[in-house]
Structure formats: structure tokens, C-alpha cells
Image (cartoon, rainbow, N blue to C red):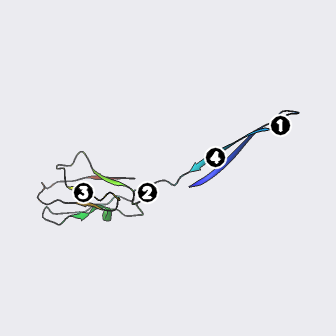
Amino acid sequence: MTAYNFIYEVTAPGCTPSTAVLTVNVNTLPDAGVAGAVDACNNDAAFNLFNILTGTPASTGTFSEAGTNPATGILSQSGDGTTAAANFTGVTPGIYVFTYTV
């Protein structure tokens, strides 16, 4: 985060100036990484979706299953953003979409 201070001053002849300070904090944009894809079989062991992301994803996000997934309940998370186990054991073959939100 970077802070910038702006000073506003009002003056009038014979009077003490009046000032106000405005501070603007500029935060770094969150980084969810770069989307990836993986092929999985419905008899594979569970794997971590976080490892599919590339780039420099922040570890403070959460995964969610998109509404178009043909099955639910295949995702479990640790809560720290870096472990999101996807378990496709026994699910119907199809395309499953997950969203990582920071």
C-alpha cells in the first residue's frame, strides 16, 4: 500500500490559514493468478486446484464451483486459500468449472 497526502489550504487577508489534509491509500490489486485446465479421470485421487493456477496467485482466495457443474460436493477447502481438493471419484464425466476469487 502506498499513501499520498494532499494538503488543501484556504487563506484570507489578515486571517490564519485553514488547512485540511486528505490521505489517499493506493492498494495493490489482488492477483488470482492465471487460469489453467487439467484432465482428470473419475477414479483419480483428489488433487489441489491451487496447483493448477499459474502466475503469482495470492493465497488468500477461495475456490467455488460454477453453477454449470454437472455435480456438486467435489470440492473441499482448507480455508487458507492454498488447498482446495477436487475429488472426482465416481462423478459423471463432463466439464467442471471452478472459480478462484481473491
Crowd rating for badge 4 (residues with CA inside 10 Å; few <14, some 14–19, many 20+): few
Give x and y (percent) for residue 60. Answer: 39, 57
Give x and y (percent) for residue 85. Answer: 25, 61
Above or below for 69 versus 80: above
Q: Is residue 88 left or right of residue 81?
A: left
For disc 3, the marked residue is: 76
For disc 2, the marked residue is: 31
Q: Is residue 51 left or right of residue 10?
A: left
Give x and y (percent) for residue 96. Answer: 22, 53
- Assign a secondary structure to mark 2: loop
For disc 4, the marked residue is: 23
Q: Residue at x 32, y 62 (%)?
A: 50
Q: Is residue 95 left or right of residue 7?
A: left
Which quadrant of the structure image shows residue 54? bottom left
Crowd rating for badge 2 (residues with CA inside 10 Å; few <14, some 14–19, many 20+): some
- Between the residue at mark 4 and the residue at mark 2, the CA separation in whole angstroms equals 25 Å
For disc 1, the marked residue is: 16
